[in-house]
């Protein structure tokens, strides 16, 4: 039977530790429900250290729920650029519009009401309700689930099935009703800083005296290994097509379903049967109407998104003929333009270093053949 003994002393030890050891994160210094909500959405899939800068800049740009509701989707995605998981930003804006339209700009105060808003899962609703309004709602993210599983010595996967329910019940019972917001922050902080997935720092843990996993001698075995999702590997090729100091981008989503609505380098999955140059030429032609030739050494890059590790190669267009198809979602961008549109961080890094290496200048020298002019002899 899963249990945590002496709940009162666990709560007290946890809060005492949190009061002394907590990180000074900017959203912990505000009581503004809107600002807290934005931080919790950003923290859903991104580490606190990375969120700090984005949260401050986002609030400078959209200081109130009204300002966010007034903004266009493009503006919001541009401010979110680099944080990833862009659906979060779209739903945040959508929810802000509902709050302004239906609630005169006031956030709902309970987790049940918050749950009705777009993008508001149980975790975010409980976090906002407890941190901003003092509701005794327990937050259970992956960090909290791991720490609770270990405290109670639960071996099962806390993200599903019976173990998930048991962990949620335990987290609710553990919640300190006098300081629910601080308790939730403390549990999340413990999971992020001390009760680490592979090497929990039990020697400095405020809860070690009451932890069943540490008594087993192998706390890292809790919860079960089945809770870790495997990583999927993907390979892709992208095109660096430049003209007069600008780069060609297309708007849409990645073939794999991420980055919907962002500006991307034209590209596709690598093919085992077709050369990267031929495949990219066909992809660019289909999307933009430009007839390009790619040669030279591929530029390797890699990134991680959702559960995917992507290994990629970028190829430079050295010759092209037009004209560019005049359709929405296909455009040239200068380095200055890139700051005001949403380009995923891995592509933005690649483009920046390509501009710095003079890639755009090299392409600028590339020939733009007039329509009907003979093709280059080098074309394959
Ligand atoms: S004692 Fe170790 S396993 Fe138990 S909660 Fe603390 S860090 Fe986690």
Image: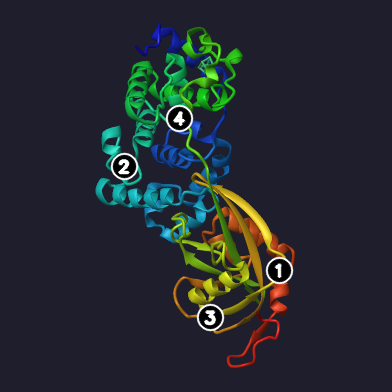
Instruction: Examine the rendered structure and indicate whether residue 209 appears above or below residue 316.
Output: above
Please state which of the two labelled residues, at mark 2 or mark 3, is closer to the viewer: 3
| Side of 239 where 44 appears, left or right | left
Picture residue at 56% right of the left edge, 40% below the top: 52
Query: Which residue does the numbered mark 1 point to in the structure image?
Result: 359
Dot 2 falls on a residue whose secondary structure is: loop
Mark earlier in primary sequence (4, 1): 4
Instruction: Examine the rendered structure and indicate whether residue 230 appears above or below residue 282.
Output: above
Q: Nearer the viewer, residue 301 or 323?
A: 301
CA gap, disc 2 and disc 1: 49 Å
Q: Tell me where residue 35 appears, x and y as whole percent.
A: 44, 40
Dot 4 falls on a residue whose secondary structure is: helix
Residues at discs 2 and 1 in contact (Cβ within 8 Å): no
Label 2: how many residues lie within 10 Å, few (<14), some (14-19) or many (20+)?
A: some
Query: Which residue does the numbered mark 3 point to in the structure image?
Result: 324
Mark earlier in primary sequence (2, 3): 2
Please state which of the two labelled residues, at mark 2 or mark 1, is closer to the viewer: 1
Query: Which residue does the numbered mark 4 point to in the structure image?
Result: 226
Query: Which residue does the numbered mark 2 point to in the structure image?
Result: 106
Label 3: how many residues lie within 10 Å, few (<14), some (14-19) or many (20+)?
A: some
CA gap, disc 4 and disc 2: 41 Å
Dot 1 falls on a residue whose secondary structure is: helix
| Side of 89 where 295 appears, left or right | right
CA gap, disc 4 and disc 1: 46 Å
Point out the residue furthest to the front here: 273
Picture residue at 51% right of the left edge, 53% below the top: 79
Quarter assignment of residue 339: bottom right
Mark earlier in primary sequence (3, 1): 3
Please state which of the two labelled residues, at mark 4 or mark 3, is closer to the viewer: 4
């Amino acid at each position: 039977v899963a249990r945590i003994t002496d709940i009162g002393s666990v709560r007290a030890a946890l809060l005492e530790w949190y009061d002394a050891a907590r990180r000074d994160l900017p959203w912990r210094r505000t009581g503004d429900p809107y600002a807290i909500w934005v931080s919790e959405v950003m923290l859903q899939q991104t580490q606190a250290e990375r969120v700090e800068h984005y949260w401050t800049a986002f609030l400078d740009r959209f200081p109130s729920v009204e300002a966010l509701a007034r903004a266009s989707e493009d503006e919001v995605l541009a401010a979110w650029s680099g944080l990833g998981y862009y659906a979060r930003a779209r739903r945040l804006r959508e929810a802000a519009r509902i709050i302004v339209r239906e609630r005169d700009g006031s956030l709902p105060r309970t987790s049940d009401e918050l749950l009705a808003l777009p993008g508001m899962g149980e975790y975010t609703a409980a976090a906002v309700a407890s941190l901003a309004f003092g509701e005794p709602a327990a937050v259970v993210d992956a960090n909290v689930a791991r720490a609770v599983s270990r405290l109670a010595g639960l071996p099962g996967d806390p993200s599903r099935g019976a173990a998930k329910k048991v962990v949620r019940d335990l987290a609710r019972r553990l919640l300190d009703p006098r300081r629910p917001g601080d308790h939730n922050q403390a549990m999340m902080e413990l999971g992020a800083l001390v009760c680490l997935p592979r090497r929990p720092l039990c020697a400095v843990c405020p809860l070690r005296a009451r932890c069943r996993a540490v008594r087993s001698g192998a706390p890292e075995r809790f919860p079960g290994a089945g809770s870790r999702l495997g990583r999927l590997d993907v390979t892709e090729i992208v095109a660096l097509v430049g003209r007069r100091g600008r780069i060609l981008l297309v708007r849409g989503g990645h073939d794999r379903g991420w980055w919907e609505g962002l500006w991307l380098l034209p590209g596709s999955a690598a093919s085992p049967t077709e050369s990267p140059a031929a495949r990219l030429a066909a992809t660019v032609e289909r999307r933009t109407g430009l007839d390009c030739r790619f040669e030279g050494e591929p530029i390797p890059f890699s990134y991680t998104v959702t559960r995917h590790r992507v290994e990629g190669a970028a190829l430079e267009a050295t010759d092209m003929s037009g004209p560019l198809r005049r359709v929405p979602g296909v455009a040239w961008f200068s380095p200055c333009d890139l700051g005001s549109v949403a380009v995923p961080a891995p592509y933005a890094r690649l483009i920046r270093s390509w501009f710095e290496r003079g890639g755009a200048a090299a392409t600028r020298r590339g020939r733009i053949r007039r329509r009907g002019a003979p093709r280059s002899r080098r074309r394959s």
